[in-house]
């Protein structure tokens, strides 16, 4: 009887210890579609420019533009997405899932020395991923 | 006489013949003639384990006897039963049937009472705690299964998170589904730990009672009536008593 108790106790301790709550919500941020995603950037800034637009040899506008790259290899294969851009300085939104959205999202008539920012997100099934903010200081 | 010895030693197979022969020889020696015999059939309860002493000399198990007429003393005995002494008078040429039911001895009844009490205590000290511990073990098993089920749900949630294909699904998982499942898992784990602790406590108590009960002496039956039947008896006295025994030797053999 004394010997029979030992396996019972060991089993109870083992069973009590072997199942732990290993699903830590705070640290579960590995899915690129998670609004709290904390991995490699899904949208990368490729280049940004401040250029002067001339008309008839005369400068008519100063424009800030950015080019970004979407790392589709991080997404589950077959994910249907569209780019969603917010101009932080003006609040304008460019939702490229909407066919009527104009492709030109540049800042026009910028003031030299001022920083102009964009928030880039992906729109997947009507919901947005984590925003990536990139800013460019107007420096023509 | 050599012939008589041989007959006695062969398990009394020819006992009626022996008795008859003894009687005949006794009659010849004593000068008393023309004694006749009668047959006796014994119906004893218990039927298979009894013995009896005939005329304080012969220990016999047979049920059919042929005896010389006149009174004969019988001491009947069987394991666990009292010795019953009686005298049967045989009438020549007649067949008789004697029915004797041997009552249980006082020692055996006391032993039975003590044995029942012992078995009851054993049941209380062993079977009952073991049953309770077994029940607690089953309950703990059920709680473990519940906890495992809750844990499996969390693992399913983790897979669902890794394979989610749009942000809203992840938001629902992280804000509604997973917190609910974590809560269920923690409740199930608490229930399991409590039941496991109770089971371990029960197992400890069961072990303690088992070891303690092993020290209880089991009643033993000493058949004092057998000692009496065989010739040795206990004579209680003011200072404890003494064993007394009788020795009988048949010088004619």
Image (cartoon, coloured by chain):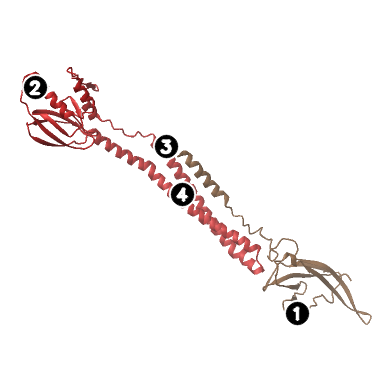
The residue shown at (23%, 37%) is B48
Q: Earlier in the sequence, mark 3 or mark 2?
A: 2
Asked if residue A51 can be seen in this view, the reply is yes
Can you say which quadrant of the picture contains the N terminus of chain B? top left
Residue that mark 3 sits on: B211
Residue A132 badge: none
Q: Residues within 10 Å of mark 3 (few under 14, many from 20)?
A: some
The residue shown at (63%, 68%) is B169
Q: Earlier in the sequence, mark 3 or mark 4?
A: 4
Residue that mark 2 sits on: B27
Mark 2 vs mark 1: tell me if same chain: no
The residue tagged with tag 2: helix, strand or loop? helix
Q: Colour of chain B?
A: red
Can you say which quadrant of the picture contains the C terminus of chain B? top left
The residue shown at (46%, 47%) is B199
Distance from Cα at disc 2 to Cα at disc 4 = 81 Å
Distance from Cα at disc 3 to Cα at disc 4 = 20 Å
Q: Colour of chain A?
A: brown
Q: Residues within 10 Å of mark 1 (few under 14, many from 20)?
A: few
Q: Residues within 10 Å of mark 2 (few under 14, many from 20)?
A: some
Give the mark toward the camera: 2 or 4. 2
Is residue B74 or residue B83 the one in the foreground? B74
For residue B152, what is the image quadrant?
A: bottom right
Q: Earlier in the sequence, mark 2 or mark 4?
A: 2
Residue most toward the right? A57
Residue that mark 1 sits on: A101
């Amino acid at each position: 009887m004394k010997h029979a108790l030992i396996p019972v106790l060991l089993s109870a301790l083992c069973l009590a210890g072997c199942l732990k709550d290993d699903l830590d919500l705070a640290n579960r941020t590995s899915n690129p579609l998670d609004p709290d995603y904390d991995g490699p950037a899904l949208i990368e800034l490729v280049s940004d420019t401040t250029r002067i637009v001339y008309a008839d040899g005369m400068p008519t506008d100063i424009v800030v533009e950015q080019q970004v790259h979407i790392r589709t290899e991080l997404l589950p294969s077959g994910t249907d997405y569209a780019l969603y851009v917010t101009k932080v300085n003006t609040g304008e939104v460019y939702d490229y899932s909407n066919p009527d959205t104009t492709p030109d999202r540049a800042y026009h008539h910028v003031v030299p020395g001022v920083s102009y920012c964009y928030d880039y997100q992906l729109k997947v099934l009507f919901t947005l991923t984590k925003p990536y903010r990139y800013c460019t200081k107007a420096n023509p | 006489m050599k012939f008589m010895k041989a007959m006695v030693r062969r398990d009394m197979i020819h006992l009626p013949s022996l008795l008859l022969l003894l009687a005949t020889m006794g009659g010849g020696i004593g000068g008393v003639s023309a004694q006749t015999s009668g047959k006796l059939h014994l119906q004893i309860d218990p039927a298979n384990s009894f013995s009896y002493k005939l005329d304080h000399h012969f220990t016999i198990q047979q049920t059919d006897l042929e005896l010389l007429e006149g009174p004969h003393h019988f001491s009947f005995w069987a394991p666990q039963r009292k010795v019953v002494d009686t005298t049967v008078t045989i009438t020549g040429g007649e067949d008789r049937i004697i029915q004797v039911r041997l009552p249980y001895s006082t020692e055996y009844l006391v032993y039975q009472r003590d044995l029942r009490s012992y078995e009851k205590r054993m049941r209380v000290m062993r079977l009952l705690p073991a049953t309770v511990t077994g029940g607690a073990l089953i309950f703990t098993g059920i709680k473990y299964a519940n906890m495992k089920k809750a844990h499996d749900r969390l693992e399913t949630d983790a897979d669902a998170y890794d394979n989610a294909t749009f942000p809203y699904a992840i938001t629902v998982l992280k804000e509604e589904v997973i917190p609910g499942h974590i809560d269920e898992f923690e409740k199930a784990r608490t229930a399991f730990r409590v039941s496991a602790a109770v089971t371990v406590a029960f197992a400890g108590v069961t072990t303690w009672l088992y070891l303690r009960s092993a020290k209880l002496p089991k009643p033993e039956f000493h058949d004092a009536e057998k000692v009496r039947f065989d010739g040795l008896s206990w004579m209680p006295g003011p200072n404890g008593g003494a064993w007394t025994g009788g020795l009988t030797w048949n010088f004619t053999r």
